[in-house]
Amino acid sequence: MATDLSFDQILGLIGELGPYQIKLLILVCLSALPEAMHSMIAVFLTADMDHWCAVEEWTPNVDDCYQYRDDNTDAYLNCLHQYRDSSIPGYLEDGEVVYEKCLKYDTNYPATWYEGYNAERYTNHTIQCDEGWVYDRSQYKASIVNDFDLVCEQKYLADTSQSLFYVGYLCGSIVSGSVADIIGRYKTFFIAITLDFVAGFVMSFAPSFWFFCLFRFLVGMANISIYLMSFVIVTELVGPSKRVYGGIATPLAFSVGSMILAVFAFFVRDWRNLSRIASVCLLPLFLLIFVLPESARWLMAKNKFEETEKVLQKIAKGNKTADKLPNDLVDQLTKQEEKRRQNTTTYTIIDLFRTPKIRKISLLLYCVWFVNSLIYFGLSLNTADLGDNDYVTFFISAAVEFPANLLVIPLTQSFLGRRYSLFGLYLVGGACCLITSFLSNLTAITAFAMTGKFCITAAYTIIYIYATELFPTTLRGVGLGSCSTVARVGSILAPLMIVLGDIYDDLHLIIFATCSIVAALVVLFLPETRGEPLKQTIDDVEATSMSDITHLSTGVDVEQTFQEKGTSTDETTVTETKLNGYDNAHYITE
């Protein structure tokens, strides 16, 4: 048996993606289902409802209308609208009467409504809603909008709550990485599941908006931590040439989780019960306590070589390759860890800006990551405005992510490579957003918006692969971690961009289109990496002429290049990168 085998070489002997890893991959990917639900549930938690000012004297009459809601929607709406038409000012827009949402006529209303009554006959003076609001509950029984009266002057708080959720994502990425380095991936994973369950369940009983926001923030922290830990555990058990399959599996599972959420939301129209269902879906993950091992790489980094050996023996046994493990496995692992530590140099974000070419790559990638996150989450959260039926549109929006992620591998391995694949996806995605902003037919709006979502989703996965190949091994962890942090800013701003649609119709779509086209132009200034060997050091990048590597390569895949040359990559790169703040349900290939 050869001496000084690396960890990845040992995995190559016992199976890079054997039956044991496949079983774990499937089980751990199940965590993406409730993770997707908690991430995208905001579409239904913050769902807007048609509303208008209430008249206190008529409250019993309005309450009587709800008896028709479940059996006869038309009768329910006709009942509500007769009270609205009698007390709310209206105006013509495109040939239709539009009623004010925050004003009512200022008059003394009769104690009992009667047919034919109209407050406009008695006064033209209006006042703001001083007795609450009436909500159209034909599509949603309850959302935080009507529970906490997030309308009129408070309208923008609903989108603010989702921005706070993504702030939780940012904090969770940082905190979970630090915690996982100290106590391990296994314990951090189950702590995150526990926090996600408790916070989500308590949130469903929120008595006030800010109480809701606090626990929504905690759900965001826990949610991203679950994904990060599950991803790291799986990728650290899979060999380098097979990691792409493990990475693609997670976003595919995320897409399925979002589709399941659409089905649950269709049958459960109350945000509190929907939140409880999403939280309960986390409980089966606790069964993984009995089958999920600790990360062997983390154990090795902590000098727990005997425990590392047990994990590798379990993998080998499951793959029926136990006879291929070296007899001196502990000694091999000890030597490799000592060698890694001797060759380890600490790099910080400052090193991304010390040299001209790394600085240029970093700034261009920051722009692209920010734009991609802004548009992806903006389109995902804006499905209510992109079709006739919120549930169907959301289901389609989730479903298009499935083929979009499957497209990544053949597209990036084609003659287009990484750069021109991104250029085309951003260009088409931006064009679709722009066209959508000018359409009025709901079917056409849905078709173009979903095509844009398809392109942005595929681009989101490619940009992880591309960025990994652009940064040298010595800066890959800090580079991708900083890119992900910039992307978080985009996701935090995405809900607030949707609010701009109230200032000017579809302004947010025009902004998305403009940003996407800018990103398409920006990627043209980045070098092509398909078929190029991964750069190991800063000097490797700086010594390479940009013009030499911006051509379209027809060479072999990066991973294949390393396998043929026997080049050893930085085995801790994927782990370090993920723990520095990886984004929602996307994969980085080494």
Image: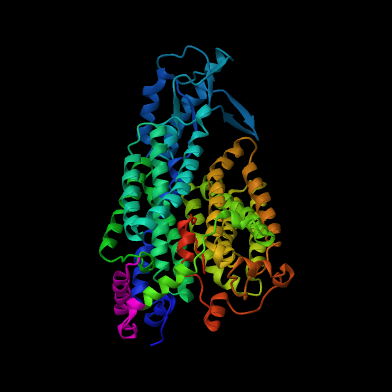
Query: Looking at the image, is 545 positioned above or below residue 320?
Result: above
Q: Quadrant of the N terminus?
A: bottom left
What residue is shown at x 52% (from left), y 48% (from top)?
A: 383
Q: Main secondary structure of the magenta part?
A: helix
Q: Residue furthest front?
A: 342
What residue is shown at x 64% (from left), y 39% (from top)?
A: 505
Q: Is 329 part of what is drawn in magenta?
A: yes
What residue is shown at x 69% (from left), y 54% (from top)?
A: 517
Query: Looking at the image, is 210 positioned above or below residue 230?
Result: above
What residue is shown at x 41% (from left), y 20% (from top)?
A: 58
Q: Position of residue 160 (x, y in %)?
A: 50, 38
Q: Is 275 part of what is drawn in magenta?
A: no
Query: Looking at the image, is 56 positioned above or below residue 416?
Result: above
* Residue 408 visible in rendering: yes
Q: In the figure, is residue 348 to the left or right of 58? A: right
User: Who is closer to the viewer here, 291 or 443?
Assistant: 291
Q: Position of residue 114 (x, y in %)?
A: 44, 19
Q: Write down the region rendered in magenta.
A: 303-331
How was this image coloured? rainbow
Q: Position of residue 27 (x, y in %)?
A: 34, 65
